[in-house]
Image (cartoon, grey):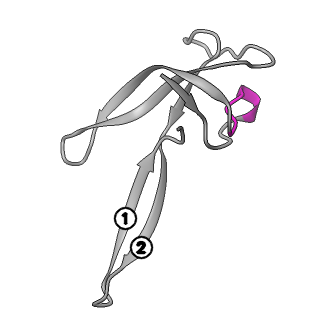
Amino acid sequence: MPVIIRSNAAMELGITKGQEAVVYRWQTAVGSCNQLILDTLFVELEKLPKPVKINGLPDNVVPLICNSTSTVCSFTDDSELQILRSQIDVL
């Protein structure tokens, strides 16, 4: 499945915003409610100026991990709820 990286994670490895890649595989973990969640996404980078090599992975395959963002939701009764959202920055 083709994806596009949405943020500059490691420029020296070619993991840059707009970089095209193909999903190679993924790893899951168990979430707080015993559900499976995406933990690490491995992608094969395409059209790189030079090959990328990480020990234990094929050429041009890199791991992407979740980034967490926190936000506060305000309600009409003046109460607030903090929400933590995690996702891997790919389209």
Q: Please provide the residue range marked out in magenta.
A: 11-17
Q: Residue furthest right?
A: 49
Reading the image, the residue beneath label 2 is: 72
Q: State yes or no: discs 2 and 1 in contact (Cβ < 8 Å).
A: yes
Q: Residue furthest left?
A: 34
Image quadrant of residue 48?
top right
In the image: residue 66, left or right of residue 19? left
What residue appears at the point 54 percent right and 42 percent down from the top-left corner? 89
What residue appears at the point 26 percent right and 43 percent down from the top-left corner? 31
**Mark 1 secondary-structure assignment:** strand
Q: Residue 16 lies in magenta, yes or no? A: yes
Q: Give amino acid for label 2.
A: Val
Tell me, for residue 42, which label it has, or none. Answer: none
Q: Residue 54 lies in magenta, yes or no? A: no
In the image: residue 48, left or right of residue 42? right
Q: Give amino acid for label 1.
A: Ile
Instruction: Give residue 1's position: percent from left, percent from top.
Output: 47, 22
Instruction: Give residue 27's position: percent from left, percent from top.
Output: 38, 26
**Mark 2 secondary-structure assignment:** strand
Dot placed on the residue nearer the N-terminal end, 2 or 1: 2
56 over 6 or under it: above or below: above
In the image: residue 31, left or right of residue 74? left
Binning the other alpha carbons within 10 Å of mark 1 as few (below 14), some (14 to 19) or many (20 upward) gives few
Reading the image, the residue beneath label 1 is: 83
50 over 73 or under it: above or below: above
What residue appears at the point 56 percent right and 12 percent down from the top-left corner? 57
